[in-house]
Image (cartoon, rainbow, N blue to C red):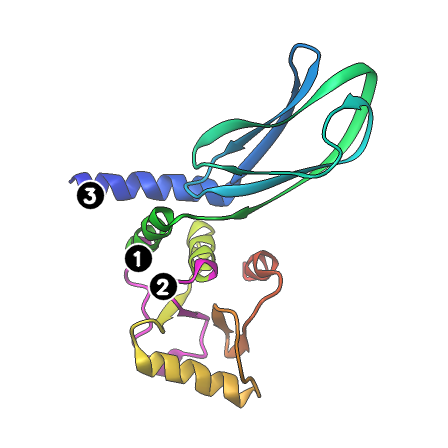
Amino acid sequence: MKLILALLLLTTTFTTAQNQPVKIEATEQDQKLVFICTNNSAITQEVTLTLTQRKGLRGYTRPITKKVAPSTTTTLASFTIAGAYNYKYSTSWKEVPNIKEQQVRKEVIAARTKGKVLRDLSKINTGIVIFDNTDCPRCQRSTAYLLDNNVPFKLLNITDNKKNHKLMWDLLEAQGVTGTINTPVILVEGELSWSHEDLPAFLKSLH
């Protein structure tokens, strides 16, 4: 029962992370403009704040990057207000999971993808099929995204199944691919894709 409850809680946190992993707010506190960062995800995030334009503010002149632990709120940066001010800023973040977080996410994804295994290879060119490396963060993010958005898909495990791994490379080599690639490798109605430069945009195009 405790294990089931833990997985349910982790799944809820992970789903929230997919919707809005990082939130940044700017507030005035004691003659300072303070940027507050909240990490809503279950994974450590490396967050970068850049003031692209500013007037009447003293402080950092270069981009500020900090690691923010899961489910925490912290001060990202603080600027002294020196009279009338205005500013523009941009933010970016990326996941930097530690070993424990990687293992937790792996367990959550495994629990959520039960029943998603493609057992009939004659249907490999039907729908969405992901060649899944269970140790690959990009694969984990892909399957989580599709689950969160109720997009039907099937999995072929290439970590433990040598036949699936060979099948993936047979398909890639038929496309003229050699050398290193970035997973996941994904089939959509028989069309193969891999090493996606903008993986979130590609996943969004699937629904």
Q: Which mark is residue 13?
A: none
Residue 116 among those drawn in magenta = yes
Q: Quadrant of the C terminus?
A: bottom right
Looking at the rendering, the stretch of residues picked out in magenta corresponds to: 112-138
Q: Are marks 3 and 2 in contact (CB under 8 Å)?
A: no
Secondary structure found at label 2: loop
Relative vertical location of residue 69 with respect to residue 77 in this rendering, above or below = below
Q: Residue 172: where, in percent of width, then height?
A: 51, 83
Question: Residue 134, labelled with which disc?
Answer: 2
Q: Amino acid at mark 1?
A: Ala
At 63% from the left edge and 40% from the top edge, which residue is drawn?
Answer: 48
Q: Position of residue 153 (x, y in %)?
A: 42, 65
Q: Earlier in the sequence, mark 3 or mark 2?
A: 3
Q: Amino acid at mark 3?
A: Leu
Nearer to the camera, 24 or 204: 24
Can you tell which mark lies on residue 3? 3
Disc 1 residue crowd, few under 14, some 14–19, many 20+, Cα 10 Å: some
SS at mark 3? Answer: helix
CA neighbours of label 3 inside 10 A, class few (<14), some (14 to 19), many (20+):
few
Q: Which residue is mark 1?
A: 110
> Considering only order in the chain, which callout, 1 or 3, is on the residue closer to the N terminus?
3
Callouts 1 and 2 close, C-beta under 8 Å: yes
The image position of residue 88, as x and y in percent, is: 77, 32
Name the amino acid type tagged 2.
Answer: Thr
Q: Residue 205, located in which quarter of the rendered image?
A: bottom right
Residue at the (18%, 39%) spot, across then down: 2
- Asked if the residue under mark 1 is in contact with the one under mark 3, i.e. CB atoms within 8 Å, the reply is no
User: In the rendered image of this protein, does residue 163 appear above or below residue 94?
Assistant: below
| Residue located at (50% from left, 48% from top) | 95
Residue 183 image point, x, y percent: 48, 69
Q: CA distance from mark 1 to mark 2?
A: 8 Å
Q: Is residue 42 left or right of residue 80?
A: left
